[in-house]
Amino acid sequence: VLFISQLYALLPVCNVRSADINQIKFKWLSVRVFYSALIMLLNFGEFIAVLYYISHTGINFHNSSTIALYIVCLLEHVFFWRLAYNWQSIMSHWYHVEQLFLSVPYRFCDEYRMKRRINIVVATVMLSALVEHFLLLSNSLHLSNLERTQCHINVSYLESVYKWERPHLHYILPYSIWFMPLLEVDVNQLLYSNECTIFIFQWINETIAYPRAFTDCFIMCIGIGLAARFHQLHGRIAAVHHKLMPAVFWTEVREHYLALKRLVRVLDNAIAPLILLAFGNNMSFICFQLFNSFKNIGVDLIVMLAFWYSLIFAVLRTSLTIFVTSSMNDYELKIISLLRDVPAKAWTTEVCKWLSELYLDALYFDFQVQRFSEQLGNDITALSGSGFFFITRQLVLAMGTTIITYELMISDVINQATIRQRTVYC
């Protein structure tokens, strides 16, 4: 996952896969930082071209999404740079917490298969993103050719693709065969183009398209790593369910729980801007596509397939991010449930202290079990979007409510009589 991040010029950290924490460093004078800075500058240059083009042609609902795309892309680079700068200290903190859960008491807990879960999530999301990319590419090639043939435009096929894919660049730079690698070019043209130039400029386009899906993958991987340790903690407590345990046991378990809580806060402070950006971008993209579903999206198979696949993939990816990342909160709720079932004779001062950590409004408890079960938990163990929302399962309902409300609103606003399928692209 970290290797993929550096391929897309994100998280420019040296020795990012090293097992030695001391070797993981952020160096300003390094190839990774230079590569990341170069990609970000090229993306910023194209963003300026977009603003220049829109300032002369006028802004509307559709080209505003292009502005949003480049803003999100640039902000992702900035936030990952911020994360890379603090990556060593974050990994150092995580490493020390990991050592607690690699000790003997936790080795007998049920295996969480963290590595397998991460591989499945990353492979599924990134391969699905690759399919989406090729569908959108096929859609652009198909529509640009329809426009060229139906309107009888006397330009080459590649120039029509260039104008369709990058109108802001076409407005500034005239078509040239050497400039086509900036776009998505067909296989035959690749054979006659400079391979090095093609690779460089084609990759710029990939660094704009893929970071959105990768950011969701990155958030899910963080969530899986944290959920694995909460799973172990839950398993250790479940193993002594309904048993009388000494105070030293509850002292150790409570300390490990608090160590996990501190780690969650550290990671939340580090990636909260990324979470806010990712969820905001996903929701805006879903709403934008829902709006387009009422407009002229076409009747061609390629157009329809690319449109609906992109929309469904965005909804499923966002939902998967919520379900995977909220696992740690689910395990904490299970831990609370287990603590409520601890026999009354086993309630020690340490158990009381622990429950006071679990409940913000808890005062000093006596040893009566029912008093604990009457408390309502206010402390949420979950990653957040800079405090605006927490990634729990309830967020799925909030997202669904927002989408349904938006769908009903635009169905009332848009005149049904004006909706027609588009068959002419001239």
Image (tube, helix red, strand yellow):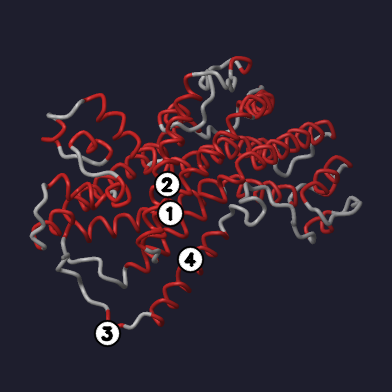
Three-letter amino acid code at the position of disc 4: Gly
Distance between the alpha carbons at the discs numbered 3 and 4: 28 Å
Q: Which residue is mark 2?
A: 47
Callouts 2 and 4 close, C-beta under 8 Å: no
72 to 395, vertically: above or below: above
Task: Give the labeled residue for mark 4.
Answer: 400
Mark 1 or mark 4: whose residue is earlier in sequence? 1
Q: Amino acid at mark 1?
A: Ile
Is 104 rendered above or below residue 335?
Answer: above
| Label 1–label 2 contact, CB within 8 A | yes
| Quarter of the view holding residue 249 | top right
Q: Quadrant of the C terminus?
A: bottom left
Q: Which mark is residue 67?
A: 1
Q: Is residue 310 visible?
A: yes
**Mark 3 or 1, which is nearer the eye?**
1
* Image point (45%, 41%), residue name: 44
The answer to whether 169 appears left or right of 120 in the picture is left
Measured in 3D between alpha carbons, the distance from the residue under mark 2 to the one under mark 4, in whole angstroms, is: 32 Å
Q: Can residue 125 be seen in this snapshot?
A: no
User: Please, what secondary structure does the residue beneath circle 1 have?
Assistant: helix
Q: Residues within 10 Å of mark 2 (few under 14, many from 20)?
A: many
Q: Earlier in the sequence, mark 2 or mark 4?
A: 2
Q: Amino acid at mark 3?
A: Ala
SS category of the residue bearing label 2: helix
Mark 3 vs mark 2, foreground winner is 2
Q: Position of residue 14 (x, y in %)?
A: 53, 19
For discs 2 and 4, the disc positioned in front in the rendered view: 2
At 60% from the left edge and 37% from the top edge, which residue is drawn?
226
